[in-house]
Image (cartoon, grey):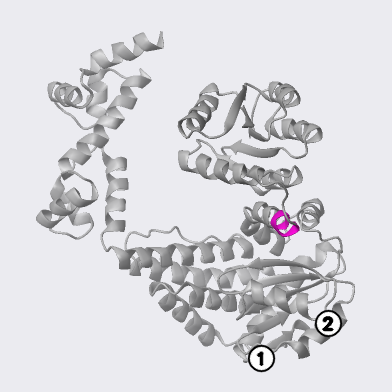
Amino acid sequence: MYKLLIADDEHLECDAIELLVRRANLPLQCIKAKNGLEAVELAELHKPEIAFLDIRMPGLDGIEAAKRIREMNEDCHIVFLTAWSTFEFAQQAIRLGASEYLVKPVQRKDVYDLLDKLIATLDEQKLSEKQQAGEIREVLNLFSREFFASLKFGRLSREAMQSYFLMQGITITEGFALVISGMDEEALRSIFQRSRLYPKLQICYFPSIDRMTVLVFTIQGVKIIEQLTGHHNHDSMVVGSGVLFSDLDGIPQSISTASIAHTHAYKHKIRFHRFSDVRKEPRDYSKLQAKNLLMIEHTLAGEVQEAKTLAHEIIDTIKANHTKEEDAIEELYEFLMMFSYELNKGIAFLHQPKPQKDTIMGQEIYLMDFIDLACEAVAEDKRDRYSRPFKFIDQYLRSHYNEQLTVEQVAKIIGLNTKYFSQLCKSYFGSTFLEYLTSIRMEKAKRLILSGEHTIKEVAEMTSFSDGNYFSRVFRQTYGSSPSSFREEQDEEKG
């Protein structure tokens, strides 16, 4: 039997987690605390193996409580309960050796999955070095995408970078970046680990679907790049090498130049290219437009890797041909507008907002996210052509429940005849169109009544019922009592 400490100033959250533990008959004794200070006191008394800590608690918050618990018990598995997720939070969680985090309101499956994993870990007497490294990497990878985007565009403080790299055992602050395609992480790691050419290199990987960015930390950067140039023999591998960085602040430029070198290598079918060998080429706007059209074609076909490869080429080419970021932003914005227009036109119910003229970083994230969203939609449409249209209808009904809606009007939105739409409603909603719309209206009516801010007549009108008697009759059929009786019963329960 292990001890699980649950600290949350909302007692319902504590009770809910304890109930889940009991129902699953997990080998855990639950100890509940109503604030951070009490959590620290109970941790000192009971020495729990696992601690669930809410981030925001009055007095002593979850971060500070975790620090004190960690000082007393460095082996305690700390899990943060949070309603928000940012890199700043991730940085603090990593420093404290957090095992995981759960986003509130917690979901039953997430709690069970996490507790099963932690209990299995506790059951093992001793973890191998490989398992320990894997756990650290798992925590870091929770935030790797946001971290890498911020790192790439120079949006991180030196302290944040040091914290991240130190957690991976990286102590050297100089080296260079590589951007590599045509090889997975395992094969690439074997090159550095098995070759006698690269002893004791400190390496950090950031994989994505079409390429991998590798930071090589070494004081022999020039020598290692020369060795890499002549000693990689994988036919499909394309490598771009960036400028050397002498401290952590130089990493963004090294990544950017490595990406440009990779694009140059890929374009000219060169297997390894250094940024210092890249020469600015004459502008060819028509070729960039052709790449953009091809990227659109691949995205509409659901070919995410091919689309992202072209996206990186377009961004790198634009960046390489502008000395001022605002000029690059302006040109990239034109490509994104065309991409957005064609994708929203080509894939129904996507409705992605227009791009912004903010930063290259923002535009790149927008494009990559848009490609992911569009390709997922294409894949879902191939599996079930009506799944997304009915998800859209569900959202539409929840937003327009207060309007006079007919089955004919709604069927027209997704381009179906009324009879066939009505048949599909039973498959996707489990009821007729009118029954489903009524259930949505009743859900909203119940919330409005419980709020106590409106009269019964106002609630009826707000949920599209012009006849108050009919509204009351439907409400009684749904909840077993009239709206007024329902309100009185709830008021009595409150006290």
Q: Which image quadrant: the C terminus? A: top left
Question: Where is mark 2, residue-wise?
Answer: 197
Magenta span: 129-133
Residue at horizontal 78 percent and vertical 31 percent from the top? 68
Image quadrant of residue 319? bottom right
Occupied quadrant, residue 364: bottom right
Residue at the location (62% across, 59% down)? 145
User: Magenta region, mostly helix, strand or loop?
Assistant: helix
For label 2, the SS is loop
For the point 71% across and 25% down, the residue is 46
Q: Look at label 2 and name its amino acid.
A: Leu
Q: What is the x, y in percent for residue 108?
A: 46, 38
Instruction: Check the image and report above or below for 28 versus 353.
Output: above
The image position of residue 385, as x and y in percent, is 27, 63
The answer to whether one can see residue 322 in this image is: no
Q: Is residue 385 in sight in this rendering?
A: yes
Amino acid beneath label 1:
Ile
Indicate which disc, 2 or 1, sits on the residue closer to the N terminus: 2
In percent of width and height, residue 9 lies at: 60, 23
Tell me if label 2 and label 1 are in contact, CB under 8 Å: no
Q: Which mark is residue 366?
A: none
**Could you say whether the residue bearing mark 1 is in a helix, strand or loop?**
loop
Relative to 216, residue 274 above or below: below
- Who is closer to the viewer here, 314 or 335? 314
Residue, disc 1: 270
- Choose between 307 and 186: the one closer to the eye: 186
Does the magenta portion include 371?
no
